Structures are given as C-alpha cells and as structure tokens.
Amino acid sequence: MASEAIEDLLKEGRTFPPPETFKRDALITDAEIYDEAAADREGFWAKQALDLDWFEEWDTILEWDAPYAKWFVGGKLNVSYNCLDRHVEAGHGDQVAFHWEGEPGDTRTITYTDLLDDVQRTANALKSLGVEKGDRVAVYLPMIPELPTIMLACARIGAVHSVVFGGFSANALRDRINDSDCKVLVTADGGYRRGSVASLKPAADEAIEDTPSIEHVLVVRRGENDVEMVDGRDHWWHDVVDSQDADCPPEPMDAEDLLYLLYTSGTTGKPKGIMHTTGGYLTQVAFTHRYVFDLHPDTDVYWCAADIGWVTGHSYIVYGPLANRTTSVMYEGVPNHPDEARFWAIIEKYKVTQLYTAPTAIRAFMKWGDEHPAKHDLSSLRLLGTVGEPINPEAWIWYQQHIGGDRCPIVDTWWQTETGGIMISPLPGATTTKPGSATFPLPGISATIYDDQGEEVGVPGGGYLVLDQPWPGMLRGIWGDDQRFRDTYWSRFSGRYFAGDGAKRDDEGYFWLLGRVDDVMNVSGHRISTTEVESALVSHPSVAEAAVIGRADAQTGQAIAAFVSPRSGYEGDEELAQELRNHVATMISPIAKPASVLFTADLPKTRSGKIMRRLLKDIAEDNQLGDTTTLADAGVVDSIKDRYLAGSGSDE
Ligand code: PRX
C-alpha cells in the first residue's frame, strides 16, 4: 500500500475493533475480566496461579511491604515441572515444543518428551559439575535448543541462571559473571549469524581469565569452529550431558525462591542484576501469554522472534509458552539471510499462527519492500504482536496490512525486564485498538500517570508512567544492591514503581507510551544506558570527556550520538572516531556503538560542571534549543551546533 494511503487512514483516526473472524474462537471476547480483576486483584491472581501445578499451595496470596512483595507465600512448585512434566503426564509428550530452525536451514524438532529428557540429563550434568540449589550459572549461547534446555535444567534443581546475550562482549560477560559469582559458564563454540559462524568461546575464554568464581565451562558444539579447551575446566556438552541419566526429580521450590537474574542497563554505568522469583513470575507470564496471544495449545504454532538473551525471550519463548504447552518456532539467525524473505518463508513453512516481534524489525521489513512478504503464503497468521519500543502508527498499519492481511489483531505490549511480564496491552478478542497505543493495563495490573509533583494526572493527560499496585511478576530486587533497587524505582514517587517511561492517556483513557524519560536509550529495541557508553568512551586513552545521547532515528527508534573531547595530543579525526566505536563494541557490545561521533574541545556544562545532555539532544535532533541560561559558557553550544549541522559529526 502506498504511504499516502496509510497517511489517510491515520488522519481518519481509524480504530480497529477485534475482527469478527478472530473473535469467533477467541478465549476472551468481552471486558468482564477487567471488572472481575478490579473487584479482587489478589483473588484474581490466585485464580490464575491455580492454573499451575503446586506441590504445596500457598498460605497467603500477597505480603506487600513496599517496595518488597512476596506472592503466594508458603507455596511450593517447580518451574520445569510446570513447563514439561505435567504436559507429558497428561498425554502430550509427542506434541512439538520447538520447531527449531538454524540459520543455514538445518532443523530440529523437539517434542515435550524430548525436552523433558534433555532437561533432566542436563540437570544431572549440572549436578555432576557441583552445581547446587541457589548457585548461579552463567549462560552465553546462541539461539540453539540447548539455551532453553539449560534454563529449565537450572530451574529443575533450583540453580539460578543468568543468561547473557550472545552479542555482548567478553568485558560485559565478565562483569555479569563476577557481579553474582557464577559457578559454571555454559557457552558454545559459535553460532550462525548472517551466513557465517560467529565465535563465542574465545570471548568466553577472555572473560573467564578474570572470574575467580567459575569452576567449570560447559561448551555446546554448534559452529564447528576451532576452540581451545582447558583440561579439567572446559567440557564438551555432548561428553557430559549425553551420558547422564534422563531422570532427575524436580526440586520443590519456594514460590519466592530466585528463578533467574537478568542484567539490564540502568542510568549508571553498572548493569543491574534484575531478580525474578518462581511462583508469581510463572503465574504472570503464563496468564499473559495465554490471553494476550490467545493461545490455543492444540492448534497454534506460535513464534516469538526475540533473542532469549533478553527478557522477551525468557518470558515469551521459554517460560510462558512452555507453561501453556505451546508449540513454538525458534529461529537461530537474522531476518535477512539468505534473503529478506526469511521470516515469511518460516511462517509459510511451519504455518505460524502468532508472530511476536519488535517495531525496529517491522520498520526494516517495510524498508526492504512489500514484495518479500507478498511472495509467501501468510494466511496461517491470526495474531501479531510487538514489543520493545513505541511503534509508529505507519509501521503498525503496514504490519496489519502486509503481514496480517487485514484479518489479524495487533497486540502492542508494553513491559520491561523489571516487570517480568506484559503489563499494558490489548486483549485481542476484546479490545478495540488504535495504531500506536498499547491501550490499557491488563486485568490485575494497575498503571497510572503522575506529574512532576507526584500528583495523578487525569484523563486525558500526560506525564510519568507509574505502576501503583504490586503485580506477581515484578522484580524482587537488584542482585547485591538493595539501595539501588529502592532509589531507582521507588523513590521518585514514594512507594510507587516509576517505570522510567513517559506516557499519556487520550480522552478515552488509552495509554500511549512516549519513550524513556531517564538516561536510558532504546536502540532497535535494545536498552542501553548513556552512562555505560560514556564510561566505555572515557576508558579509552584518547578521551578526556564524553557525553552520549539517544537521538530520534526513523529506523532504529533512537541512534547513539557521542560528543567527545579528546585529550591533548590526540587528533579528533575519522580514524579516531572509528577506533572509539570499536572500543565501545569491545567494552560493551556492537549494539552500543555510537552512530555518530563529534569531537569538540568543550562540552556544554552548568556552572557546577554538570554536562547538559538535554542541549546536546536538541542539537542532534535539530530542535529549538532549550533553556541555556544555566550554561557556564553559552558559546560552546553554538560552536557544537555549527559543526554538527555542517556534518562534522562523523557518521558511521
Ligand atoms: O521504554 C520502554 C520500552 O522498553 C523499555 C524496557 O526495555 P527492556 O527492559 O529491555 O524490555 C524490553 C522488552 C519488554 C520500556 O521501559 N518498551 C517496551 N515495550 C514497549 C516499550 N515502549 C513502548 N511501547 C512498547 N510496547
């Protein structure tokens, strides 16, 4: 469809009620469930928790002593039992859990029985390496079936996994391992990316040169690339796992026992180990997965195209879907290999019914052209989802028409690593959607908007997004840093969770997410802190000072713009810019590389020496400059602005 036609649709302010054909078989088709949940929030969540299998039921649904929540106190359960054993015991062992597709086109079909066997063997292998309940296991793997397997194996024996996205550097991996003293690291030789093998083991080796807690490394063979194995420390997965007994009883875990740590960027340089526990988390991800994606386990083939290294993969590739006995597609590689139609070929091949992806991917698909999806039969799709950043209405409409064939509802799901599960989203059979709005908090979830003074903003109105009631999947803390937990989330509006996002409600109460209001950037749906990139830049010998901002970008949502003052003796030229980009990739990850680097002798500062990033953002986005009266030297801004506009900001 031509973009003028999309513009016209948007101008009309068109809304999208649930399509009748979808509604016919949808699990929820009216708004009653919202009233039920509002009348008794705790009772509502307890009812959802009963859809899980508990070894022992809880005594108390919720103990809430802000900001500390305990859900289903006294209850005992095991996450891997809920994701696997109970389905096999109910006669569904032959159902496919994962249709796995490697990037080169190799495939593996893994049934619930297969996965249960693999998980038990892997759990026994972990035990043989000395892993016990409560120990932390670092996982640094590509998107291969061993990734969900190791997570579930940890859950089975009560070990805590800490998955580190395979795109992170050795430095980033080392810091995460050391922060929580992981005992074992699970990695692979390499994985496929864009047609060739990207190695992982060498980065893992580099990381563990300086991780005293690591006793063993378990290595999956995937890329077949040469790697070094250290005797006594490194073990091939197939040597240690395959020979184990496929029987390992699930450990009964307390509802509040730690299930996993997942590191995410905050507003300081040091990533935060977000803590998620067992009973409440599984309740929320199972509930939201079932009803937001309208999951029919006997007939659906669901595909979440995220990487398990991020929370979306934890909650909506592994835990939610498996708890609900889903048949999923899992794909190893990039969307444009061997060509730009790969996703659509996968959908046609497996007859995918639900696709969950990110706005940045949708915008890339739009750019690559309508002809790619048009070549494939996408008629199996009945629902589409998005997550990770605000979706622009043009991309929403394109997705709806070119992928959804005008018949699929779209669920725009707002949530965070910290929330554990989806918080604001349509219910696809009940909610009339508006392109670009995540619509309403889900049943059992309460969200509102505050102004600067901490007063609730009415409808319509905008301000800061706040979650004013505890929810089951909420983070229980930051590993090893309780003060930071309280300061980051609970102090801005005392006793209420401040999400870090701006939002507004329109006159019908629909929520529209407006992006981060703190020093966190969102680049292609990846969360990166400005301070983390600044620290990486400043750690380079040529850099005296650096300021980093996220500027609006049509493709990636935000792009990283760096302003750097070099130390004397260094020339701020293209060569140095490139070196600094590579340095950031080494210190953090290629995803954190600045898109532009502008060298400047001075940065705009207040008289007390604080860098005014807001002004740099105005410059980079070519906005009217904000208030400059507090600047120590107003000339600095003009000079940076002139040079930025003249294009001397070195762009990659
Ligand atoms: O700014 C919001 C944005 O992503 C942030 C959370 O990032 P992360 O913890 O990495 O989790 C991403 C996947 C859940 C939020 O603070 N965000 C996420 N989903 C949306 C969104 N912004 C707007 N609309 C969304 N649907």
Image (cartoon, rainbow, N blue to C red):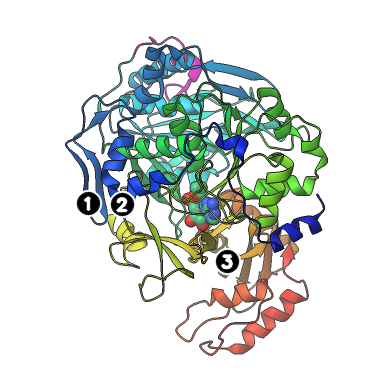
| Nearer to me, 263 or 603 | 263
| Nearer to me, 645 or 476 | 476
Tell me the mark number nearer the camera, choosing from 3 and 1.
1
Residue 160 sits in which quadrant? Answer: top left
Q: Is residue 625 visible?
A: yes
The correct choice, above or below, for 545 with respect to 48 in the image is below
Which residue is depicted at the point 70% across and 23% down?
349
Magenta-colored stretch includes residue 236: yes
Residue 403 sits in which quadrant? Answer: top right
Check contact, mark 2 vs mark 1: CB within 8 A.
Answer: yes
Q: Which residues are magenta?
A: 231-247
Tell me how far mark 2 sits from mark 3, CA to CA.
Answer: 34 Å
Q: Amino acid at mark 2?
A: Pro
User: Which residue matches tag 3?
Assistant: 548
Q: Give the x, y percent position of residue 364.
A: 72, 47
User: Which residue matches tag 2?
Assistant: 470
User: Which residue matches tag 1?
Assistant: 64
Give the crowd class for mark 3: few <14, some 14-19, many >=20 residues within 10 Å: many
Q: Amino acid at mark 3?
A: Val
